[in-house]
Image: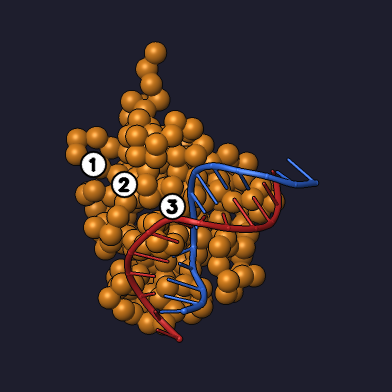
Chain colours: A orange, B red, C blue
Amino acid sequence: MQSVSHVAYDVRRLSRAGLPLGTAELARYLVGKTIVRNVGRSRIVGRIVETEAYPPGDSSGHAYRGETASNHSLFLGRGFAYVYFTYGMHYMLNVSAEEPGVGAGVLLRALEPLEGIKLMERRRRTEELVDLARGPGRLAVALQIDQRLDGVDLCVDGPLWLGTEARKTLHIGRSVRIGITREVDRLMRFFEVGNPFVSGPKSLSMK
DNA sequence: TATGCGATATTCT
DNA sequence: GAATATCGCATAG
């Protein structure tokens, strides 16, 4: 029997012009879209099922205190990768939002694995499908993300890009964000309702 | 399902 | 020195 990881999905790159203006709008738009990681001759494809918006002026966002060497990618305009390292061991992958010169980003928090599942299993050291990319740290490991991908244009052919949806997206829910201590009440987290690959407590992902 | 803890490195105070 | 957009393992309910 053919393994799921060998199915080729017909996903095409999202164009920058097609990305909505506004950080929250982009975060919502990206739920159901795909992310494609080319590594060597193989590729990994995941369906984005959970995101968080960190809009301009939000004190929980990394761009809040202005542009620095480390958060530069958040200011490139929309559709670029912003990769950072936290908790001493985890990389996080964001998509920059807003116009060039304005710092904002969308954190990709969870994927539904579609293609390259064997590669993800190897990297994650587990064969538990729902755990491969559920949570931002796991997602980065599964996609082989590190600081070398910081600043990559996600709208051109290359090591990492955003793709069209592989299937219809049903209901998109909204909640507070996870793991932050400032601006905790803003409803800036988006997810596909009922999708088992969404991270966080179930109580946050009902609607 | 919830809560607690330790691991670990970069950034900011 | 403290905090951190987390994870995996432990234990309890």
Say whether residue A5 is visible. Answer: yes
- Residue A69 in picture, x, y percent from top left: 27, 76
Would residue A153 be found to the left or right of residue A93 on screen? Answer: left
Please, is residue A20 above or below residue A167 in the view?
below
| Disc on the earlier residue, 3 or 1 | 1
- Residue A206 in picture, x, y percent from top left: 68, 49
Residue under circle 2? A144
Residue under circle 1? A39
Q: For mark 2, name the chain.
A: A
Residue sitting farthest toward the left: A40
Q: For mark 1, name the chain.
A: A
Q: Amino acid at mark 1?
A: Val
Give the label on residue A137, or none. 3
Q: Secondary structure at mark 2?
A: loop
Q: Residue at x 45, y 39 (%)?
A: A132
Q: Nearer the viewer, residue A147 or A125?
A: A125
- Residue C1 in picture, x, y percent from top left: 47, 79
Q: Residue at x 48, y 79 (%)?
A: A57
Q: Secondary structure at mark 1?
A: strand
Same-subunit check for callouts 3 and 1: yes
Q: Residue at x 26, y 63 (%)?
A: A151
Label 3: how many Cα within 10 Å (few below 14, some 14–19, many 20+): many
